[in-house]
Image (spheres, rainbow, N blue to C red):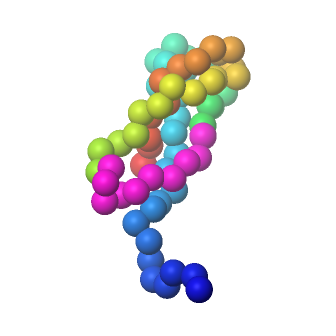
Amino acid sequence: MAKKGKGNRVQVILECTEQREQGVPGISRYITTKNKKNTTSRLERNKYNPFMKKVTVHREIK
């Protein structure tokens, strides 16, 4: 039987910070989920940016 009610996991969008600072055209974004009870601060992950062709820091945006 499936769980009922609203869960603690929410979808968040991660956007590249280095690309915005350097003014490179395009937007590198990833969608992931996080547990809003356990992780109250914004997520920060190293992800591949296809526009810059390297791994960069992606932070959660609102």
Q: Is residue 41 something that shows in the picture? A: yes
Of residue 15 and residue 21, the one placed in the foreground of this image is 15
**Vertical position of residue 28 compared to residue 9: above or below:** above
| 43 on left or right of 3 | left
| 14 on left or right of 52 | left
Q: Position of residue 41 (x, y in %)?
A: 30, 45
Q: Position of residue 45 (x, y in %)?
A: 47, 31
Q: Position of residue 47 (x, y in %)?
A: 57, 27
**Vertical position of residue 6 compared to residue 38: above or below:** below
Q: How many marks?
A: 0
What residue do we see at 68% from left, 14% from top?
53
Look at the image and tell me in which quarter the N terminus lies.
bottom right
Q: Is residue 20 something that shows in the picture? A: no
Query: Which range of residues does the magenta coloring cover?
Result: 30-39
| 43 on left or right of 33 | left
**Vertical position of residue 35 compared to residue 25: above or below:** below
What residue do we see at 60% from left, 40% from top?
30
**Vertical position of residue 18 compared to residue 29: above or below:** above
What residue do we see at 62% from left, 31% from top?
28
Of residue 15 and residue 6, the one placed in the foreground of this image is 6
| 42 on left or right of 11 | left
State the predominant SS element of the stretch in magenta: strand
**Would you say residue 40 sits in the magenta stretch?**
no
Q: Quadrant of residue 42?
A: top left
Of residue 32 and residue 50, the one placed in the foreground of this image is 32
Q: Position of residue 37 (x, y in %)?
A: 31, 59
